[in-house]
Amino acid sequence: MRTPVHSSHFSSLLGLNPNLIRRFGNHTADYRLYPETGYFVEAFDTHAYLSWLNNRNSGHFRRPLSLYVHIPFCHTLCSHCNFHQIIAHDNADSTNTYLHYLLREIKLHGQLFKNDPKVEQVYFGGGTPTYLNDTQLGEIIAGIQQNFNLVHEGEYCIEIDPRHFQHRSVQALRDMGFNYAIIGVQDFDQQVQQSIQRLQSEEVTLHAIQSAQQAKFQSIRIELSFGLPKQNLDKFAYTLEQIIAVDPNQIKLLNYQHLPERFKAQRSIDPADLPSVKARFEMRLFAIARLTETGYTHIGMNLFAKLDDPLVHARRQGRLHYGLQGYSIYPDCDHVALGLSGIGSIGPTLHQNHCDLAQYYDKLGQNTLPIMRGLELNADDLIRRSVMHALICHAVISHESVEAFFPIEFKKYFSDELTELRSYEQAGLVTLDHDEIVVTPQGQLLINSVCKVFDKYLRANQQRKNRLLLI
């Protein structure tokens, strides 16, 4: 029998309360991508991408490379999912066709980057990368190795679905060169699993984690959801305790966002089954306190890591970076997007591949990169992104450090933002003095909301809504 959990002790321990969460805890944008894809334009196409790539290769700017490989296939549709996916039902023809075009895209990009610095990061995401069998994954890895120069001690990460490893070996992934693993966990309670149409037993999940540990993966991250339908504090606490017991390197808390108007799969979820605001607050508060008590350090953005994790060392030494793949110990990279709907960046630009499979195939069939849309960031975008990422990585930013890189007077440029931050200061989330902004430990737990103040696009949308209300 599970012992009921109470959150009042943890609330006082962390200096948070429900009122603070209600005021500042509802904004969930993680700002890995700024601006968001909704602001991308189709005028930024393959031609625009190649133009910026030529600037890069001409030596105007050159940074290390990071590759993102998107595998869109899944066996079943999870109703809580908000990622681009294709339900393939073990269709070998569809996966082999996708593999054919993906390898063609890898080769096209490889030709464009043939004289480039080494690749420091590779990230396989989805969908479900482990939907592919070992032979298929091996073909992709071989294609990348043939066309890019991978560093020996790089970060090579793959998202793992534990349900695929009852008859497969996690060691095979390690032998391919993967050294970082991400494993998603929703809740070990069967009612919660049934409500989101994802049956993933405790036994299977813990076995996958332990297998990755035995295979000597350098880092294993568990992404644990809260706020799911049918979930409550006791169920969530039980799942968290079982995860803590197997001692993964990192644990990231994912706040489920119910947006059925945007994500069709979520329309099957009954809103009445969703936990209350108070219950979500208790789950998050409990997780933060337990992870802190059991030796995890809060990196930021709900990511917690063991004290010996490289991210912890990088944060302490001021070497932490934040970008399209989240936190990293590597300096800012140019990101090459490979696969359906992949998002990448070259210099001060962002771009996204086609999200429609037929269009993706059509472009590659013409030996053309499948760029669907993108954006050239303006000076304001770059300034604001740099401020937000500095706060996310270091919890402090000096006015002088921004003025050293950009031709602005910080207080004048961000006068509205500094005024708005006064309410955050009164709530104990930041401190403001003559020449810097410091995010307090409590504010670091709500860093999304602090960054929101600098989000020009969000501010413009809110002003537009306010004008409409006055009409």
Image (spheres, helix red, strand yellow):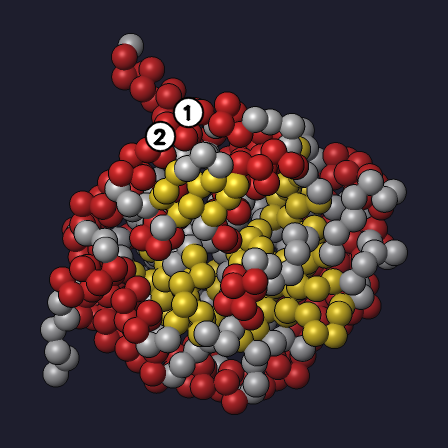
Mark 1 and mark 2 residues within 8 Å of each other at the beta carbon: yes
Quadrant containing the C terminus in the rendered view: top left
Where residue 327 sits in the image (x, y, percent)?
Answer: 53, 58
Residue 417 appears in the picture as rendered? yes
- Disc 2 residue type (three-letter): Glu
Where residue 465 sits in the image (x, y, percent)?
Answer: 34, 22
Q: Nearer the viewer, residue 461 or 360?
A: 461
Q: Residue 248's image quarter?
A: bottom left
The residues tagged by marks 1 and 2 sit, at their Cα atoms, a distance apart of 6 Å
Q: Residue furthest top?
A: 471
Q: Nearer the viewer, residue 243 or 374?
A: 243
Where residue 319 sits in the image (x, y, percent)?
Answer: 60, 59
Query: Which residue lies at the image location 64% right of the left edge and 60% below the top edge?
Result: 330
Give the SS element for disc 1: helix
144 on left or right of 419: right
Give the number of the disc on residue 420.
2
Give the number of the disc on residue 416.
1
Q: Nearer the viewer, residue 444 or 94?
A: 444
Query: Which residue lies at the image location 47% right of the left edge and 53% below the top edge?
Result: 83
